[in-house]
Amino acid sequence: MDLRQLRYFVAVAERGSISLAAQAVHIAQPALTRQIQALEEELGTAVFERTTRGVHLTEAGKQLLLDANRLLGDATAAMERAQRAGRGEIGHLTIALPVMLTLHSLLADALRLFRREAPGVSLTLSHLLSDAQIELLPTGRLDAGFTLFRPLDDPAFKGIPIYSEKMLVAYPADWHWDNGGPTSLRELAGRDFIWLPRNAAPVWHDRLIHCFFKAGFVPRSSIQGVDVGSMLTLVAAGLGCTVLPDSATRAAPPTVAFKELPDLDVVQHWELVWRADNQSAPLERFIDIVTTHVADPSRRLV
């Protein structure tokens, strides 16, 4: 017994006539009769009572009609779900966001647009440092992430640029300066610094340290934070200065001052990154939305 036989059976049962059912399902009447006979032989019982006025369901036929309608409905729903999944309309995505105090408006735009266009796709969001994202992507535990860097020479990853952000020196607002604030990194020599541990973000840590090498000193690390939020809190508490992205100014209390310095010449270039062989339809839909509506067209790096 297959779905085609069940459809033929339902057509006959609903019309009470094999000839009318044959017209409805576009099959010759003798062929439809043979299908019904084959169904009854497989079941070992009659599903129709034949009369000169047509056919009527037997008790077995009445029960089969209830089950057939349910099975055919389930089959139709399964087909529709598969088609929607193939179009990226349903499914699940795991997306990593930067460890930031405030979500950049472009990232929020991407998530809002995706939710509007694919409401059937469930999302799992997490805040992860870039290094952690790059480690998780190959495992399949993460579909894509908004990350600060990726190995550009590694064909296992693909990415599209989203936005860039300048870096600022953040320091306690009550620190005394002869000229109202630092004008170069060198003026920070001897001050206490708050840093991320190198093992948390080695590439980014080394880029920043290189700026201070060029300025002629190594920052004196007094305490270590774990992310942008914790580092901003430590600066607000007066425990030292640090380097933070411009977006941190939007969440900073008045006890924190910020300064853009000409020799702090590092910029954060954020990308959406994913595993190159990930064929997930919801992921492809998300990438398309980000590419079309959010990504920075001047920095295509795919």
Image: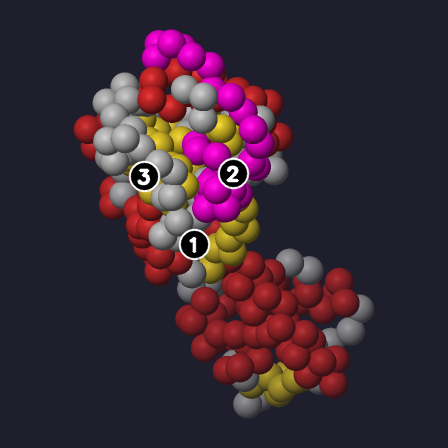
Within 10 Å of the Cα at label 2, are there few (<14), some (14-19), or many (20+) other Cα atoms?
Answer: some
Q: CA distance from mark 1 to mark 2?
A: 49 Å
Disc 1 target residue: 89
* Position of 286 relative to 170 (above/below): below
Q: Is residue 193 visible?
A: yes
Residue at 50 percent across and 82 percent down: it is: 15
Percent position (x, y) of residue 25?
Answer: 45, 67
* Position of 201 relative to 1 (above/below): above
Q: CA distance from mark 3 to mark 1?
A: 44 Å
Quadrant of image for the C terminus: top left
Q: Is-magenta flag for residue 239?
A: yes
67 or 123, which is in the foreground?
123
Q: Which label is found at residue 278?
A: none
Mark 1 vs mark 2, foreground winner is: 2
Q: Amino acid at mark 2?
A: Leu
Dot 3 falls on a residue whose secondary structure is strand
Residue at 38 percent across and 9 percent down: it is: 216
Disc 3 target residue: 258
Within 10 Å of the Cα at label 1, are there few (<14), some (14-19), or many (20+) other Cα atoms?
Answer: many
